[in-house]
Structure formats: structure tokens, C-alpha cells
Image (cartoon, rainbow, N blue to C red):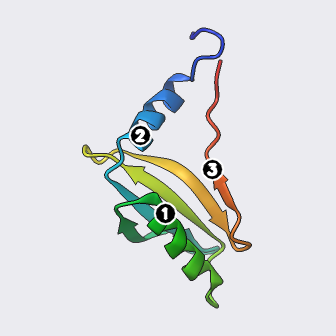
Amino acid sequence: MGKRGELRDMDKWEESIRNSAVAFSVVMFQPGASSRVYQTFEDLTTAQEYSKVVLQEANRIRSAMIYAIDNAGHHALVGTMDRALKWKEVVLKRY
């Protein structure tokens, strides 16, 4: 068990992926269908802007999830965006 105030083990590992990300994948969630990767970008800002564009179109997509990808191909969720274009970043948990 970690010391009080330290990141939990899984959050520490995922944060290392987010900090060393080489790409960001945009995954769209549509009810009744499987989630799919729509695009991959080199920076987070472009991925967020792309998510806004797709979510404003007339479609059944409910939300966008953006994942950071590191050199080894590991991925970690960075945050989500809903149809109201509200960005919700991942909250890290501590002991």
C-alpha cells in the first residue's frame, strides 16, 4: 500500500503513458454499436477539436473518448467529451 497522497499504482502507470504520449486516438461511443477509433492525432488539442466537430454533426454518437498512446502501444484514457461539448478529464486517485 502506498503512502498517503501518492498516486495509486494503476493511475501512476497510466499517467506515465499520458506524459510520454506520441499519439492520441479518438474513440466514439454510439449506443447499440461497438466503440470505434475514428482518428489518431499527434496532439491532444487537435483530437479535442476533431471530437467537437464530429459531436456537432447529426449522428447517433453520444460521446468521444480520447486515449493517449505511447511508443510501446500502451493506451490510457485522457478524457471524454459529451454532446454538449463538455470536456471531462480523467481524475487521478491517491491513497
Viewer-proximal residue among 62 and 3: 3
Marks 3 and 1: in contact by CB < 8 Å? no
The disc at residue 45 is: 1
- Whole-number angstrom distance, CA of label 1 to CA of label 3: 13 Å
Q: Is residue 80 above or below residue 52?
A: above
Q: Is residue 8 above or below residue 79?
A: above
- Whole-number angstrom distance, CA of label 3 to CA of label 2: 14 Å
Q: Is residue 35 left or right of residue 90?
A: left
- Whole-number angstrom distance, CA of label 2 to CA of label 1: 15 Å
- Where residue 41 appears, as percent x and y from the top left, is 37, 66
Q: Is residue 22 above or below residue 83?
A: above
Please tell me whether mark 2 sits on a helix, a strand or a loop: helix
The quarter of the image holding the N terminus is: top right
What residue is shown at x 62% (from left), y 50% (from top)? 89
First in residue order: circle 2 vs circle 1? 2
Looking at the rendering, which quadrant does residue 93 occupy?
top right
The disc at residue 3 is: none
Amino acid type indicated by mark 2: Asn
- Where residue 65 appears, as percent x and y from the top left, is 55, 61
Please tell me whether mark 3 sits on a helix, a strand or a loop: strand
Amino acid type indicated by mark 3: Glu
Please tell me whether mark 1 sits on a helix, a strand or a loop: helix
Amino acid type indicated by mark 1: Thr
Marks 2 and 3: in contact by CB < 8 Å? no
Direction right: furthest residue: 84
Asked whether the viewer can see residue 35, the reply is: no
What residue is shown at x 64% (from left), y 73% (from top)? 31
What residue is shown at x 43% (from left), y 43% (from top)? 18
Direction bottom: furthest residue: 58
What residue is shown at x 64% (from left), y 91% (from top)? 58
State the residue position of label 2. 19
The disc at residue 89 is: 3
